[in-house]
Amino acid sequence: MKKIVVLLGVLVVGLFANESVSHHTDIIPRTINFLIFIGILWYLLADKVKSFYKSREESIANSFQEIEEQLVKSEEQKEALKAEVELAHKKAEDIIKTAKIEAEMLKSQIIENAKKEIEVLNKQFEEQKAYEEIKMKRRVVEEHLNYLVKDIHLSSEEVADIVTKKVG
């Protein structure tokens, strides 16, 4: 109801403004009509414009708040990731240290095993060498005896006699 009364009042003022005292210039009535038009627009649209700007302001504020929250979360995640990276670096360093220790242990074990193997091979070589020397001596003695015995003709009884005299 209040809107209708204000609207009628504005219309009456608008009509009064059109019947200006001066017929040669109509700037004053046009200005009054323009101000009345602005007043009507303001009266009709002010609440909608205010609510639009208020909602727009709130949406922008909400957007900024969400962005700030995301920024805080990303900073927290960044710090958490930095801590994880540092932990991973420490673990990597520990793994490298452990691997170096294990490599040194394996190296010393391999060297120790190689030394033992060399000792075993040397011992086997010496045993084989002694065996071959004995074998060679027997063959030389046998060949020499065969050479010597070849010219001597003894019967088996004579050989048995020589052996028994030598042994007994």
Image (spheres, rainbow, N blue to C red):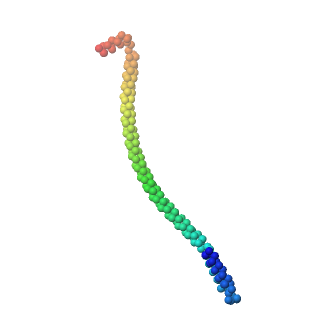
Q: Is residue 62 above or below residue 127?
A: below
Q: Quadrant of the N terminus?
A: bottom right
Apparent side of residue 10 relative to residue 142 in the rendered image (left or right):
right
Taking depth in this image into account, of 1 and 143 the one nearest to the observer is 1
Residue 96: percent from the left, percent from the top?
A: 42, 49
Residue 95: percent from the left, percent from the top?
A: 42, 48
Looking at the rendering, which quadrant does residue 45 occupy? bottom right
Q: Is residue 64 above or below residue 86?
A: below
Taking depth in this image into account, of 6 and 122 the one nearest to the observer is 6
Residue 54: percent from the left, percent from the top?
A: 56, 70
Q: Is residue 149 above or below residue 48?
A: above
Apparent side of residue 92 relative to residue 6 in the rendered image (left or right):
left
Taking depth in this image into account, of 83 and 57 the one nearest to the observer is 57
Can I make out residue 8 in this image? yes
x 39%, y 46%: residue: 101
Work out which residue is located at the far front of the displayed protein and give it.
1
x 37%, y 29%: residue: 127
Residue 159: percent from the left, percent from the top?
A: 35, 13
Work out which residue is located at the far right of the displayed protein and give it.
23
Can I make out residue 60 in this image? no
Work out which residue is located at the far top of the displayed protein and give it.
157
x 41%, y 46%: residue: 99
Q: Is residue 136 above or below residue 13?
A: above
